[in-house]
Image: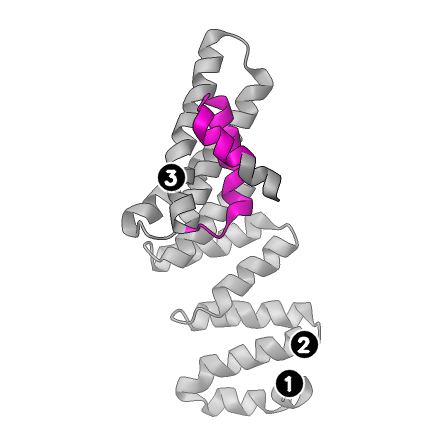
Amino acid sequence: LKDADKTLQYAPEALQNGGDLYCSTLQYMANAYQWKKDSVNYLNILKRGFHSCRRSLFFFPRIVDYFTEKNQLDSALVFTNEALKADSTHLLYLFAKSTLLLNMGDNDGSYAVSEKIIALNDTLAEPYYNAGTAFINKASKQEETAAGRADKLTLRRYYENARPYFERYRQLAPDQQDKWVPSLYRIYLNLNMGRQFEEMDALMKQH
């Protein structure tokens, strides 16, 4: 019924007698605090659930979202690393770390984690996007300072490295054109791939 006050009124007794329902009760409490816009207690309950209910997929992503929305990426990364200590091959935890590192500007770190995810499961789309974006980001930095032949060769190599990841991302997520068209447009332009560039150029003009 989305009655936050009544949910919280009966929560303490439910927690004492919940048994297998303990984690569900914490989830209901988190929802109630979110409805009440009580961010302090919302976060506290998420932390409690994160530490007490390791099998639940409810608490961890919401903690990461909470800190991400507040631009506290370091705090989100602390919880992600803690989660990975408990399960180093959990795909959700790994993807969260890859994305956080990418947003923090650690392109090499993000790429390494993305590669680990791909090695564990090569049918997930988003790790390819993160890996390719890491090389695009490195290319952007290189473009700011590129001068001599060696710098330009490095720049080209970044685009060459990004290309297979975005082409694979396109295969796995064909509906996500807003994410792969601009990147492949840029890649094909810089690699002087005329036919492929023309295809991306046409798609860009459709949007």
Q: Vertically, is 194 above or below 112?
A: above
Q: Crowding near pointer 2: few (<14 within 10 Å), some, many (20+)?
A: some
- Residue found 45% across the figure and 43% down from its top: 129
Is 194 colored magenta in this rendering?
A: yes
Cα separation between marks 3 and 2: 38 Å
- Mark 3 secondary-structure assignment: helix
Quadrant into which the C terminus falls = top right
Residue 118 in the image, given as x and y percentages of width and height: 33, 47
Q: Along the line of sight, which residue is nearer the eye, 139 or 100? A: 139
- Mark 2 secondary-structure assignment: helix
Residue 189 appearing in the image: yes
Residue for badge 3:
112
The amino acid at mark 1 is Lys
- Residue found 41% across the figure and 32% down from its top: 163
Looking at the image, residue 87 sits to the left or right of residue 137; the answer is left
Q: Crowding near pointer 1: few (<14 within 10 Å), some, many (20+)?
A: few
Residue for badge 1:
2
